[in-house]
Image: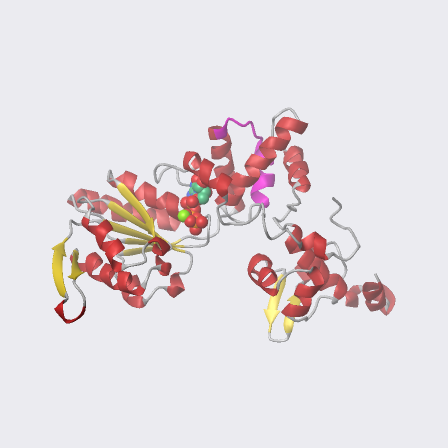
Amino acid sequence: MNWDDTAPPTAEDAAGAAADRLVAADADGEDTAVEAALRPKDLEEFVGQERVREQLDLVLKAARARGATADHVLLSGAPGLGKTTLSMIIAAEMGAPIRITSGPAIQHAGDLAAILSSLQEGEVLFLDEIHRMSRPAEEMLYMAMEDFRVDVIVGKGPGATAIPLELPPFTLVGATTRAGLLPPPLRDRFGFTGHMEFYAPAELQRVIHRSAGLLDVVIETEGAAEIAGRSRGTPRIANRLLRRVRDYAQVKADGVITREVASQALGVYEVDGRGLDRLDRAVLTALLKLFGGGPVGLSTLAVAVGEERETVEEVAEPFLVREGLLARTPRGRIATPAAWTHMGLVPPQQQAGGSGQQGLFGA
Ligand SMILES: Nc1ncnc2c1ncn2[C@@H]1O[C@H](COP(=O)(O)OP(=O)(O)OP(=O)(O)O)[C@@H](O)[C@H]1O
Ligand SMILES: [Mg+2]
């Protein structure tokens, strides 16, 4: 694959790129299968997130010293940054069992009542995607969090009665990718909120070394750095790229991951030096080559790459914006100078003799 390919991207180039992306932050089937083995088991092993780790360490140590159940904890942050991992660490650090469920799994308040009433004292209840819980369940949760009590409604209509049910003290750990969507009364009932940030390359490098050790893969520092730089600040992506690079190293090299092996492998998988994949590059290429860097409307840009508007807007753009390669303006999408540099192209006004525009659109 030649990244500097001058032909405009075709629909075929972009099609499928969104479906099964190596650089997607959400877990795929394979991730789910191997992630359990790669999860750090205690705070010490958990890489990065210094602030959250330090604060959480205090919360847990204090609770342990008092012999009490830890305060409820809310973890917010983008997919793949370690929320589920941290919830398990909280339970492990407290020496408590953990029960795992998620917002979408709780359709009725009764579902939640059943879970809450079967908790043991001190148990950690991990509620993933807590922003997707139903309204009635949410209201039941308020009372459970605050007073360790729920009202179970028996019967219907005028004859319905609320039977109060005492709960043992427990620790709720809620996780959300969208903290802004949580109703304030719910947010306020957490004693501690940890905001997970994207990881620095050096931190991802540590994640990769650690995972390589667990997977019995030999990796050089430079090899880990190469993978880290393409992992979009996300441990899940780092671990996934490591597995693909390991395959390549076994088949095409002597199994050792050097910088060169990592770079070649990720070239095969079309993940570039900055973690952009084919879809990301198709969007940038269209924006730069067909529209001179913009501004261009989202719909036009989507047609040019042969993708749905939503795919461009929700799948490709967030990372391009985060990387400072693309900006969304009221007049449309524009490429930043960094985008031109990254794609190895020269902006029209910098091209010699003013013939740049023509050359650009004529290409
Ligand atoms: N700080 C970390 N140190 C080492 N590995 C990590 C760290 N954070 C996450 N990982 C690894 O990344 C993978 C994904 O982490 P996890 O499942 O906890 O993410 P998440 O935030 O729960 O994602 P989602 O929002 O999709 O549920 C796991 O395999 C885990 O081992
Ligand atoms: Mg998770």
On the picture, is 40 further left or further right than 342?
left
Residue 179 sits in which quadrant?
bottom left
Is residue 224 magenta-colored? yes
Which color scheme does this rendered protein use? secondary structure
On the picture, is 299 further left or further right than 71?
right
The location of residue 280, given as percent across then percent down, is 64, 55
* Residue at left offset 15%, top offset 66%: 160
Total marks placed: 0
Q: Residue furthest bottom?
A: 331
The location of residue 124, given as percent across then percent down, is 26, 46
Which quadrant is home to the C terminus? bottom right
The location of residue 362, given as percent across then percent down, is 85, 64
The location of residue 35, given as percent across then percent down, is 44, 38
* Residue at left offset 18%, top offset 66%: 156
Q: Is residue 224 above or below residue 54?
A: above
On the picture, is 285 further left or further right than 181?
right
Residue 195 sits in which quadrant?
bottom left
Which quadrant is home to the N terminus? top right
Q: Residue furthest top?
A: 254
Is residue 246 magenta-colored? no
Residue 48 showing in the rendered view: no
Give the prevailing secondary structure in the magenta stretch: helix
* Residue at left offset 41%, top offset 60%: 178
Which residues are drawn in magenta? 215-230
Closer-to-camera residue (158/8): 158
Residue 354 showing in the rendered view: yes
Q: Is residue 176 above or below residue 40?
A: below
